[in-house]
């Protein structure tokens, strides 16, 4: 019985000392170089690895976004032009985590939202982009779409806002 208690005590000691070094490693790690990481992401041809790299940036920003400067915001805004909607989604989340300091990215966020707003919402980055705009302090514009049976929404070609019309 005493051996069992001793092994638990040793295990607990190892866990607490290990946990301290992990958090210490994160504290000692320098902030990511956002612009250089974005350059690597843009040069990568594989959409999955671009998504994973952008997700790592989001994780770093969740921990601390105080190191972000204006050039980093603009580099992240450039990722909103990526061909992968998953990358655009993660870039929008990153900008939302920065909050009001990402105000220079609002035009890029609005453009990206206009491009995806009329596609099925469960299959695109529109929700993340709208949340990013709200976190920055800007209300997203309503989409300029019309309802269609069996599909959902489609963009108006004439650009005028009208009440939704069912098309056949």
Image (tube, grey):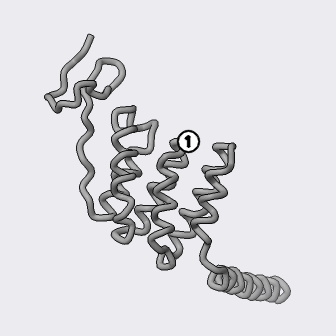
Residue at the far left: name it: 163
In the rendered image, the vertical position of residue 161 relative to residue 63, given as above or below: above
Q: Quadrant of residue 168?
A: top left
In the rendered image, the vertical position of residue 88 relative to residue 58, given as above or below: above
- Residue sitting at x 26%, y 59%: 138
The location of residue 59, given as percent across then percent down, is: 56, 65
The location of residue 4, given as percent across then percent down, is: 81, 83
**Foreground: 17 or 58?**
58
In the rendered image, the vertical position of residue 7 relative to residue 54, given as above or below: below
**Foreground: 15 or 87?**
87
- Residue sitting at x 50%, y 59%: 76
**Foreground: 63 or 2?**
63
Q: How many dots with numbers?
A: 1
The location of residue 35, given as percent across then percent down, is: 58, 65
Secondary element type, mark 1: loop
* Quarter of the figure with the N terminus: bottom right
The location of residue 20, given as percent across then percent down, is: 68, 86
In the rendered image, the vertical position of residue 128 relative to residue 158, given as above or below: below
Q: Residues within 10 Å of mark 1 (few under 14, many from 20)?
A: some
- Residue sitting at x 49%, y 54%: 78
- Residue sitting at x 37%, y 71%: 101
Q: Is residue 135 left or right of residue 12?
A: left
**Foreground: 46 or 13?**
46
Residue at the far top: name it: 168
Identify the residue position indicated by label 1 in the image: 84
């Amino acid at each position: 019985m005493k051996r069992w208690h001793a092994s638990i005590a040793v295990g607990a000691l190892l866990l607490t000392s290990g946990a301290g070094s992990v958090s210490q490693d994160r504290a000692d790690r320098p902030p990511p170089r956002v612009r250089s990481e974005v350059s690597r992401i843009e040069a990568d041809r594989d959409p999955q690895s671009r998504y994973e790299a952008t997700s790592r940036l989001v994780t770093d920003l969740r921990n601390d976004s105080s190191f972000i400067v204006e050039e980093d915001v603009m580099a992240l805004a450039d990722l909103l032009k990526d061909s992968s909607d998953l990358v655009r989604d993660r870039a929008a989340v990153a900008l939302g985590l920065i909050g009001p300091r990402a105000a220079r990215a609002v035009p890029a966020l609005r453009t990206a939202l206009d491009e995806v707003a009329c596609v099925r919402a469960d299959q695109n980055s529109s929700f993340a982009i709208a949340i990013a705009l709200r976190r920055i302090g800007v209300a997203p514009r309503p989409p300029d779409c019309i309802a269609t049976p069996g599909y959902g929404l489609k963009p108006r070609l004439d650009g005028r806002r009208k009440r939704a019309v069912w098309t056949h």
